[in-house]
Image (spheres, rainbow, N blue to C red):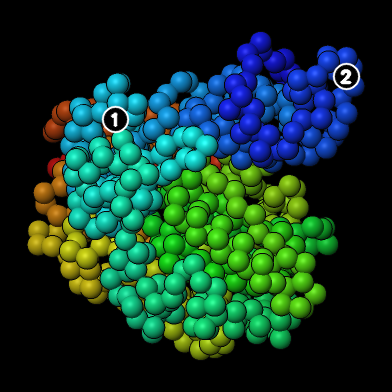
Amino acid sequence: MDLRFGDSRPTDEERAAVDALLGPPESSWEGADRSDADLRWARGGRAARDRRDLLLPGLHALNDRVGWISEGGLDYLCRRLTVPPSEAYGVATFYSMFSVRPRPATVLHVCTDLACAAAGAPRLCEAAEARLGPESGVTVEPSPCLGLCERAPAALVVRAGEDAAGATAGGGVTRAAAVSAPAAPDAVVRAALAPENAPEEPPAALAVPQAPDPGLLLLGRVGTVDPADLGDYRAHGGYTALRRAFALGPAGVIREVTDSGLLGRGGAAFPTGRKWQATASQPDHPHYLVCNADESEPGTFKDRVLMEGDPYALVEAMTIAAYATGARHGYLYLRGEYPRALERMEHAIAQARARGLLGDDVLGQGFSFDIEIRRGAGAYICGEETALFNSIEGFRGEPRSKPPFPVEKGLFGKPTVANNVETLVNVLPVLTLGAQAYAAIGTGASTGPKLFCVSGSVDRPGIYELPFGATLGELLTLAGVRDGLRAVLLGGAAGGFVRPDELDIPLTFEGTREAGTTLGSGVVMAFDDTVPLPRLLLRIAEFFRDESCGQCVPCRVGTVRQEEALHRIAERTGADAAADITLLREVGRAMRDASICGLGQTAWNAVESAIDRLGAYE
């Protein structure tokens, strides 16, 4: 273990950024400018080690203030937390949003993933790079999915500084998000040069074509309620579910959730009630609640819209989940690419705390619970729950082997329940309608409403709420699918393609499974015949190669071999391609059978389905 520090010194800005998070240092051991005599004692070392989980926030503090993480700044943070510099360097280099090399204070991230690539993102990126030279003080970085697929092509502007400003663009530039028309290079360049002058971004309701519709169970308040106004939320039924939870008691809440048949909406479809019961029954304490809001699957943006348009619903739902499972502390792990969602959730949590809806005595019921936000920094793998735990704890976001499962030993080695945003928000109608009424929506095996992220070759991209059992064709009709439909990708990059003649597939977990595909987290991306399918498959392979954490050989090597083979196939046809397709199948089976986590296990799915169902290389 490398415990040595370098000779580099932090700048005043870097020192101020770290001290603002951790407080001023108390001794030279922690980096204070005092006599070296007190280096003989490591006072408070155990307390500092117990703050290892502040490493990720500390890296954010440095990166946000300066734009990159210098050796001196990293060493100072390591001294404050007694973290070996080698380990901290490994964490800092794990995330794509951090840089350990000098770069300008302003970074323009241009999404080059599936929906944006089909909408012209490569041309946007080239135009921005041509017009933003080194003298502009802006660096342009191609980016994986930014979660703005309904506004493709999209871009995110991040400016470092004491009063850092963020703006995202997709169809024009706004302050922290995008409008609906295609992004223009002029607008993107203007935002990159002066993000603080970017116009206000459009309301979250523009991402919900069905809004305003009070009949929607999950999206009904989006576009109707002021997301910043707690009183408005309560006037529209807010905190009714929490009051019923207190009336039922923890066991009663778990029984309602179990009887409702609610399955996890993150892709695994695990019964939520069983997960909650398993956590609540663990004798080891404390228990933790983690909300996974790090949706990074290309084509997924539903959690972002919920947090931007109805943030108090998530706060209430997390409080209910904590009450049922005996958790006193909750973590909201939020994508680093979601500046407006971060702002909305910080405000909602602060308001709930000020009004007695979070804290030591929630609603006067003697229940203590609070929520802490942790920002991700650009790592798809952190959507896997155990990788997310490692990230919060201040380690590289690499998945853990199971068992033990999180309900036994999760965050900080304690029983932990982890759900994504959509799953938690579904708990509100479960309690307000009752388990039986909720279970009557959808199908017997897939109950309740489901959110679908529709993008690509459609006239009305956005988030759609439909009961389980609606068909793929019905959903695409609502979204206005365009003529010349070539393929539909279900489940995102980890999902599978279906043909235009398979639109009668019921959108349920069991229905898509029987059809030989997957529902995943609800991604539906339509591609017409103008989109080059081989290029899409190559982009999927590039995505998995970039996002593999590298911990296990099948995924680390397999994703590279998959990309290499697809590159070769794109340059050849006929008999020469057959050998590479055979190799792809062998590599795909190895990744599926032997990878530690779902990233490697699903990295071959979309390519396999394109070859077998679409005849991509015939």
In the image, residue 516 above or below residue 511: above
Compared across the picture, whether 607 is left or right of 306 comes to left
Would residue 148 be seen by someone viewing this image from the given angle?
no
Q: Amino acid at mark 2?
A: Asp
Q: Position of residue 178 (x, y in %)?
A: 30, 53
In the image, residue 189 above or below residue 173: above
Q: Position of residue 509 (x, y in %)?
A: 42, 68
* Residue of label 1: 565
Lower position in the chain sequence, tag 1 or tag 2? 2
Per the image, label 1 sits on a secondary structure element best described as helix
Q: Residues within 10 Å of mark 2 (few under 14, many from 20)?
A: few
What residue is drawn where x is 54% and y is 69%? 312
Compared across the picture, whether 449 is left or right of 578 comes to right
What residue is drawn where x is 19% and y is 44%? 184
Quarter of the picture holding the C terminus: top left
What residue is drawn where x is 69% and y is 62%? 370
Q: Which quadrant of the structure image shows residue 75?
A: top right
Q: Amino acid at mark 1?
A: Ala
In the image, residue 242 above or below residue 510: below
Q: Nearer the viewer, residue 575 or 516?
A: 516
* Residue of label 2: 38
Quarter of the picture holding the N terminus: top right
